Image (spheres, rainbow, N blue to C red):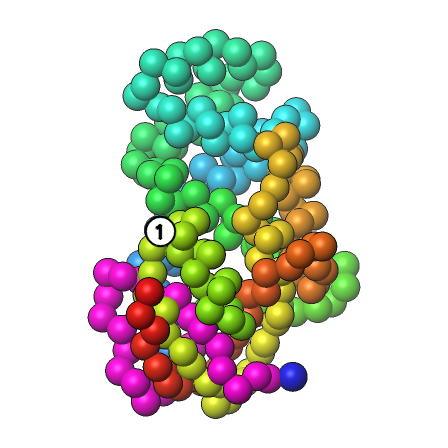
Amino acid sequence: MVKEKYYRIDSILSDLPAIGKVIETDKVFDINRIARFAELKSIFEKTYNYSDQYNLPVATILELISTMNTPRFNLLYSRIEVGKDQVNSIIEDVNKANLQLNKEGRFFFDYILTIAKKKIFDEKKIDLPDRFLSKYFFENLGDCYSYIREFGIGKIIEVKFIEVNYLLRADNKLLSSFENDATSKDLLKQSEDFLLGVETLNPVYEIVFRGKYQITKHINF
């Protein structure tokens, strides 16, 4: 059931759309985000495969990447016991692409979600929409405030959906909370659960939407 209003977190780097403006999701996708994902894809693909092949936590590689150019990197690198050629290839790609993991780590889940989307289609014949062509909303302000407090970005707008082409009510916790020892297979399972509408014990709902929506209010935070 479609609610009367939803809330979206917009980037603080851009002007908020005017109240009353109608936005069609298929016409406002982020070309720069799509291009950057393409540049980083090999890093996340190799990271995923490394974890999968050796059944190691994804955090093993992500922590290594996050400490590059620091003294801790050498310590973590010395502890790697398997697949050093693969790790070296990942590091080389990180340097080439100038990956900023603290800002661009979300692309890793975007990569896993593309795998989950294909897997669901192959196994269940459910054709889910392209994540990069969708927009994302929360159902209440409390969830928006929690997201901003955790990630430190964004301004809030209130909207109403005018034309719904696709709507998925999914548990955002499956994309934001995972164990430190989670492997790529674990994260793939969580991503599949997210896309299929599985819920955790205390879900935080994210609305994945394609269609037309109208700006009804700017929310101060």
Which residue appears at 70% of the width and 59% of the height?
A: 199
Please tell me whether residue 99 belongs to the stretch shown in magenta. no
Residue 93 % position (x, y): 38, 32
144 w.r.t. 62: above or below: below
**Residue that mark 1 sits on:** 152
Using the image as rendered, state which of residue 203 and residue 82 is in the foreground. Answer: 203
Q: Is residue 89 visible?
A: no
Q: Is residue 217 visible?
A: yes
Which residue appears at 39% of the width and 17% of the height?
A: 73
Residue 10 % position (x, y): 34, 66
51 w.r.t. 124: above or below: above
Which of the 4 quarters of the picture holds residue 215?
bottom left
Magenta segment's dominant SS is loop
- Horizontally, residue 174 falls left or right of residue 137, namely right
Residue 151 % position (x, y): 40, 50
The image quadrant where one finds the C terminus is: bottom left
Using the image as rendered, state which of residue 174 and residue 34 is in the foreground. Answer: 174
The image quadrant where one finds the N terminus is: bottom right
Q: Which residues are magenta?
A: 2-26
Q: Label 1 neighbourhood size at 10 Å, few (<14), some (14-19), many (20+)?
A: few
